Image (cartoon, grey):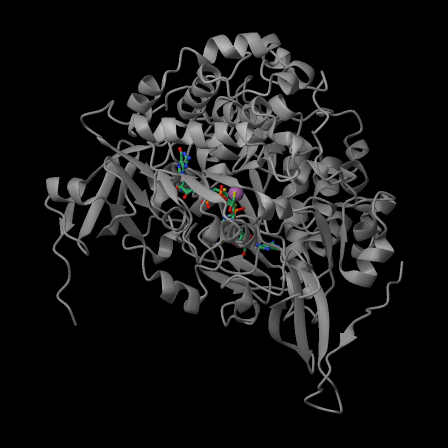
Amino acid sequence: MNIPVNTTRATAPANPAQPPLQVRGACPHDCPDTCSLLTTVENGVATRVQGNPDHPQTGGVLCNKVSRYTERTYHPERLLQPLRRVGPKGSGQFEAVSWASALSDIAARLKAIAARNPEAIVPYSYAGTMGQVQGESMAGRFFNRLGASFLDRTICSTAGGEGLSQTLGGKVGMRVEFFAESKLIIIWGSNSIGSNLHFWRYAQQAKRDGAKLICIDPRRSETAEKCHEHIALLPGTDAALALALMHELITHNWLDHDYIARHTLGWEQLRERALQWSPERAAAVCAVPVAQIRALARDYGQCFVNQQPAAIRLNYGMQRVRGGGNATRAVACLPALIGAWRHRAGGVLLSSSGLFPVDKAALQRPDLLAGRAPRTINMVTIGDDLLRPSSPQFGPQIEALIVYNSNPVAVAPDSGKVVQGFARENLFTVVLEHFQTDTADYADYLLPATTQLEHWDVHSAYGHTDALLNRPAIKPLGQAKPNTQIFRELAAHMGFTEPCFLDSDETLACAVYGDNIDFQQLLDHGFATLKLLDAPFAEGHFPTPSGRCEFFSERLAAQGLDGLPEHLPNHETPGSSNEFPLAMISPPARNFLNSSFVNVKSLRDIEGEPLLEMHAQDAAARGIASGAIVRVFNARGDYRVRAEVSVRARPGVVNGMGIWWRKLGLDGTNVNQLTSQRLTDLGRGPVFYDCLVEVQLSAPPPAPI
Ligand SMILES: Nc1nc2c(c(=O)[nH]1)N[C@H]1C(S)=C(S)[C@@H](COP(=O)(O)OP(=O)(O)OC[C@H]3O[C@@H](n4cnc5c(=O)[nH]c(N)nc54)[C@H](O)[C@@H]3O)O[C@H]1N2
Ligand SMILES: Nc1nc2c(c(=O)[nH]1)N[C@H]1C(S)=C(S)[C@@H](COP(=O)(O)OP(=O)(O)OC[C@H]3O[C@@H](n4cnc5c(=O)[nH]c(N)nc54)[C@H](O)[C@@H]3O)O[C@H]1N2
Ligand SMILES: [Mo]
């Protein structure tokens, strides 16, 4: 298929011979906002990346990170040619090789392993780009045809996703723009200013129109300090808080009985459960004043009494603990109790990704498995799994790992184990990357990938309801190739002759939504808004098996699990250990995107260096002053970092801001040296924020220069 590169010309050409072009694209990053981009191209060089003012969700505004996208694309350390390892594993020493020799050697190595057992080959990818094309399309075809192990892509959102699906029926919820009309906005487990800036614009609009904003977060984040109320509960106690809110709604009869009767399932059971959670009991678990819980319940209940819309912006911060799935379930029950769904500005939004009609089968072609059913490796436990020998339960030892769109050595939990696994001499590792990340250091082959300015893609969003198209603005730099092209060529070297391996990126882009979204509209405008009801659940119609909001989940009960939401204490409950008395959470730093952008100097300069925020009381008890270098440790490892005595930290909880590249840290580690590979109650997710540590002074602060 041939698609003309149809760009609009900027009004004032700087160079009449070759006027600047503005090319419409989409931000590829793992962020709810999925912005529409306008890239200015002069003489084949991208000179500026701006937010598209014609796209209402973007509103012409970009975050600090992506407005510097050209700095990332033209970074002097961009990988521009294929590299082969020459030094010891992990040394990061490489020599340049040709694409032909890299691909034929990789194919030979993979063929030899596949001849014994293709499941010994494991893909490892996440959302370095959220693009449907550069994500799992050609790559999915490649691994399906090979019969490689499946990867359970759990590192971010599966606990909350599963909790939401069990309750509401899918990753569905309110339309984000209607938050602007809400009268009460509860921001629950999210630092929106840092990680969901375009939602925050709607919240600001509501605030100007008199809405009350409440933030529920152990950390006094940039968002928490701008809300009217901040409830700084202990990490992993959200379900207790939600159940106590229900208790108050019930005892005060702030309940929409009609909505409950017609559109929910399991009310009597939930009622009984919630009545066990008095505000006093929850206050003790959450370590917040009981009056704060009562006030929150009153605010929420009054929205029912006064028939005003109450909206919850739930996010993933609260599900990175053992009980994260159940906590999400508990919160997702709340809007039905007060009938908040009746209003278009009421309800809850965690993720809108389930609303997009993506044709995964067309992209990934599961038919290429030809009846094989490979085992599944959970990306959260890659540390342990790389170290496992072959066994009947596990299957074959992992012999090859192909990493793309991810930096597991920095982002996966328990990184001491992850590093040990990647360092195995008998592991063959291929990494597709823009930069020589911590993971790239361990590659046997490091292959240069294109950035968003250099390739086609199509994007669904998880924080709004528009699909976006990304056109290439410039030619690939150096010898970089799109992920799709690398897998296409690798498939040819493997001898895979199915015609689907010849599909172009434009063909793949067209296949993403098939007939569900008009591709021509994406080509013409750069985005297309899904056709949805304003208040999707005003009349029930939840996409659950019962069509109701399922307070009680028959599906969970059938698996032998609790059918009702319950508070499950953390694996590492705050206060349960004398040896490791502090709870550590590790939320993202505002100027990074997970571990992306850490190597962009202007952004790293804003963040300064890795920090551990501590409450004054916890710091004083350990003789720690702001600026001191401290050792944070637990049974899994040690991490040296600068302490910052800060009002952002609550007593008993330290905030290890993430996710730095290990090699840029003080001792070549990062915060994931301390996190565990244990899993969540639902969705097999990670428990990054369920982690006990101790902190001690490591060395006196260096003398000021
Ligand atoms: N700037 C920036 N934006 C990002 C990212 C980034 O790294 N940087 N990451 C992107 C990704 S991958 C994702 S998944 C989303 C995540 O988006 P969100 O889920 O909104 O994540 P955060 O903004 O980190 O907010 C998590 C908040 O939860 C708090 N928290 C920690 N533990 C608990 C708890 O037990 N209960 C409650 N109630 N709160 C808790 C943390 O202190 C933090 O402020 O953001 C995306 N956007
Ligand atoms: N301690 C702690 N750990 C965490 C979290 C936390 O809050 N605390 N958050 C977790 C969460 S929510 C997530 S989502 C994960 C994120 O983990 P990852 O998905 O691994 O995200 P990044 O660290 O941003 O790494 C993505 C990599 O993909 C590369 N990339 C981008 N585009 C392309 C492309 O087109 N092709 C190729 N080949 N490469 C590309 C980037 O250069 C980057 O190095 O981290 C998790 N880890
Ligand atoms: Mo994430």
Image vertical order of residue 271 relative to residue 528, above or below: above
Residue furthest bottom in the image: 16
Residue at the spot x=66%, y=59% of the render? Answer: 101
Would you place residue 329 above or below residue 146 in this image?
above
Q: Does the rendering let one see residue 443? A: no
Q: Position of residue 303 (x, y in %)?
A: 53, 32
- Look at the image and tell me in which quarter the C terminus lies: bottom left
624 to 394, vertically: above or below:
below
Q: Is residue 171 visible?
A: yes
For image coordinates 71% across by 41% down, the residue present is 140
The residue depicted at 79 percent of the width and 61 percent of the height is 525
Judge left or right: residue 339 versus residue 90: right
Seen from this angle, which residue lies furthest front? 306
Place of residue 155 in the rendered image (x, y in percent of width and height, measured from the top left): 52, 37
| 403 relative to 485 in the view: left or right | left
User: In the shown orientation, is residue 571 left or right of residue 343?
Assistant: left
248 and 378: which one is in front? 248
Task: Give the residue displayed 64% in from the left and 30% down from the top.
Answer: 341
Quadrant that contains the N terminus = bottom right
Q: In which quarter of the view is residue 182 placed?
A: top right
Place of residue 587 in the rendered image (x, y in percent of width and height, measured from the top left)? 40, 44
- Name the quadrant containing residue 146: top right
135 or 262, which lies in front? 262
Q: Is residue 16 left or right of residue 418?
A: right
Counting every numbered tag in the picture gives 0
Q: Residue 676 location, x and y as percent?
A: 38, 32
